[in-house]
Image (tube, rainbow, N blue to C red):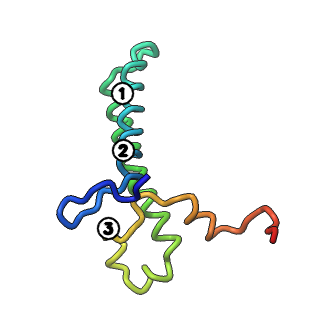
Amino acid sequence: MHRILFTIGNFPVYSYGVFLGLAFFVGILFAIRRAPRFGVSSEAVIEAASLCIIGAVLGSRLAYVILHWDYYRQFPSHIFLFPGGGGSPSTAEFSERLPSPFPTFA
């Protein structure tokens, strides 16, 4: 799998973001299709999904800023520059910052 699928001008399109977006889209379609069985309108599903996506983007940025606070303390105006990272934090990024509950084997 390629990290960068293609570029649009100087903007790289990453495979992780494309597949994450595709997963959201398919999940929303699935929820819209099943919603009437539970008495929920498709509009309510779309509204909830929109709020979830906004919350996910803002929450991932907040987590990224917290994990890199040493940098953002010096450059607070960079907190709102999304191209610098933090659109979707990876598990590896969290795991290298948190203490491991498992002993390290050499």
Position of 68 with respect to 100 (left or right) is left
First-in-chain label (3 vs 2): 2
Label 1 neighbour load within 10 Å: few <14, some 14-19, many 20+: some
Identify the residue at image location x=42%, y=32%: 27
Identify residue type, mark 3: Pro
First-in-chain label (2 vs 1): 2
How far apart are labels 1 and 3 at the CA level?
29 Å
Number of marks in the rendered image: 3
Image-quadrant location for residue 21: top left
How far apart are labels 2 and 1 at the CA level?
12 Å
Foreground of the two, 102 or 66:
102
Identify the residue at image location x=82%, y=66%: 103
Identify residue type, mark 2: Gly
Q: Which residue lies furthest to the bottom in this view?
A: 74
Q: Residue 51 at what x, y percent from top left?
A: 37, 43
Residue occupied by mark 3: 83
Image-quadrant location for residue 48: top left
Quadrant of the drawing holding the C terminus: bottom right
Residue occupied by mark 1: 29
Q: In this view, does 34 lie above or below 104?
A: above
Identify the residue at image location x=57%, y=58%: 91
Residue occupied by mark 2: 21
Foreground of the two, 13 or 94:
13
